[in-house]
Amino acid sequence: MEKTTMKLTHKFRIVVDLPTYAERKEAMDKLYRWRNRCYRAANLIVSHLYVQEMLKEFFYLTEGVQYKLADEKKHEAGMLTRSRINTTYRALSDRFKGEMPMNILSCLNNSIISSFRKESEAYCKGERSIKNFKKTMAFPFGLEGIGGFCYNEEKRTFYFRLFSIPFRIYLGKGRTEKTKVLQQVISGEIKMCSSHIKINDGKVFWLPVFEIKKEEPTLKPEIIAEASMSFEYPLIVKIGRARYTIGTQEEFLYRRLAIQASLERLRVGAQYCRSDKGTRRKLKATEKLKKAESNYVNNRLHVYSKRLIDLCVEHKAGTLILADQQEKMEVAKTEEFVLRNWSYYNLMTKIKYKANKAGIELIM
């Protein structure tokens, strides 16, 4: 049976809501400490899981050695003193208890175990290496960590507490849409699942996962929209006798190539910048332009994919076919310019996500 709901991750910037600088700094230091402990815990968990999974491959052990990964109380050949899931949680508890909320460690443990099980076959075959978590990783927490979620009518903003740390949600751009989503969470129309906290350049971002209902199926499956990506236009759409083009080669590439040219000039000129604090200062401008190019491409692809889905909804097309993509991808691989600048895969990913949200069946 097809699911009537889907999970979406939103991104909100949040600000510590405390009156003095010393209190805000103390709260930020606590968040940085939690992130550091999560980074260490995540690498510890995946190392334990890998050793447990590969223990049966140690063929050089004697025959009398038991290697059943189960609780010894539940299985006669079991070699663990507790359940397998509890082994890593206990290791984290013994090492980090008192340094951070155990709810965070519990969510982290469950998340890594879930992803490890999906990839364990590839680990055993040697097709991939185990994950290596970075110090800048986002750390998870459950609903138990959030309290006092409310909307202040006077200040027109939302507040909540994360493990006793008060936060104010900075709405910024897209204020209307964000306010609508958060109001639905408060009223119970949208269910909030797990969340993550991401710290980037001193800014704190909240990444909650919402479970929302799919839009009502007012579309007709017998009406088929056929879309294809070309080198002249990002998207060409045919619905019945109607034909539409979305974007143009010049419109999409002009700004991107201009950014790339500026980036190349900055790279050449970086050698003449005063070093002061080393390489980071020399490359500060180039890093800024790299983000500008990425943001521009993401914005344009969102616009194109949204326009495609809007056309399908307008014509009540319940089926969307992306035609001739394999051929296009093969040509793109031989053309370095196209592969570098056209972002085919990214566009297809965004189309797939928006089609699923609108209840449109996508056929690749």
Image (cartoon, rainbow, N blue to C red):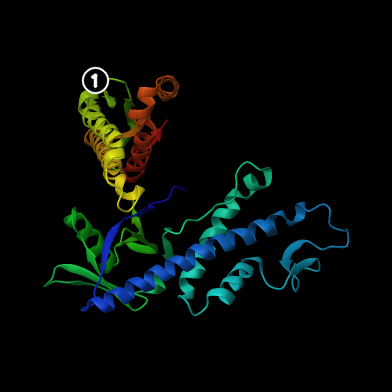
Residue 257 picture quarter:
top left
Q: Is residue 211 above or below residue 123?
A: below
**Going 22% across and 68% down the picture, which residue do you hit?**
158
Residue occupied by mark 1: 241
**Going 81% across and 69% down the picture, which residue do you hit?**
76
Q: What element carries label 1?
A: loop
Q: Position of residue 216 (x, y in %)?
A: 30, 48
Q: Are there few (<14), some (14-19), or many (20+) residues within 10 Å of tag 1?
A: few
Residue 32 picture quarter:
bottom left
Q: In this view, does 299 lie above or below 39?
A: above
Q: Position of residue 238 (x, y in %)?
A: 28, 23
Q: Looking at numbered disc 1 in the image, what kind of residue is underneath it?
A: Arg
Q: Where is residue 105 in the image (x, y as percent from the top left)?
A: 50, 69
Nearest the viewer among 47 and 11 is 47
Residue 254 visible in the displayed image = yes
**Going 51% across and 60% down the picture, which residue do you hit?**
111
Residue 244 visible in the displayed image = no
Q: Where is residue 13 in the image (x, y as percent from the top left)?
A: 27, 61
Residue 301 picture quarter:
top left
- Quadrant (top left/top right/bottom left/bottom right) for the C terminus: top left
Nearest the viewer among 269 and 146 is 269
Which residue in the rendered view is the most extreme toward the right?
A: 63
Q: In this view, does 335 lie above or below 314?
A: above
